[in-house]
Image (spheres, rainbow, N blue to C red):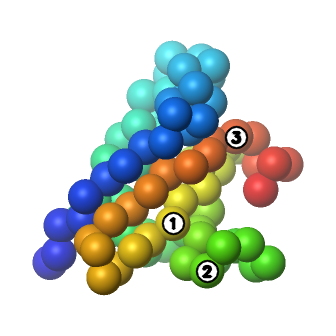
Amino acid sequence: MRIYELEVRASATKDLAGLPPRQRDRIALRIDGLITDPLPPQSAPLHGQLHGSRRLRVGRYRVGYTINAKAGLIVVWAIGPRESF
């Protein structure tokens, strides 16, 4: 099992800070899970976006992230309601 490095952009941190505490904790746990499993069953590729971009479903919220397998890096760039993804 490969361990990835995680980078959370400032925009995603700001999005996360604006959520209710219960949702924030739930999403943070799922983001941490990406370190060991970057392609969980709740994720799907984003069509028409950057190459390698995916969305992770967490209840009614979505986490936008990109996987760089060569560098071993996952970049979380946005968190928002389902309608925004």
Q: Is residue 55 above or below residue 78?
A: below
How far apart marks 1 and 2 lie (CA) works out to 8 Å
- Mark 3: few/some/many CA within 10 Å (<14, 14-19, 20+): some
To which residue does mark 1 refer?
66
Q: Is residue 81 visible to the viewer in this orientation of the structure?
A: yes
Q: Is residue 35 above or below residue 29?
A: below
The residue shown at (39%, 62%) is 74
Which circle's residue, 2 or 3, is located before the other in the chain?
2
Q: Amino acid at mark 1?
A: Thr
To which residue does mark 2 refer?
51
To which residue does mark 3 refer?
80
Which circle's residue, 3 or 1, is located before the other in the chain?
1
Whether residue 83 sits left or right of residue 16 in the image: it is: right
- Mark 1: few/some/many CA within 10 Å (<14, 14-19, 20+): many
The residue shown at (59%, 71%) is 53
Which circle's residue, 1 or 2, is located before the other in the chain?
2
- Nearer mark to the viewer, of 3 and 1: 1
Q: Is residue 57 above or below residue 13?
A: below
The residue shown at (29%, 74%) is 71
The residue shown at (62%, 30%) is 15
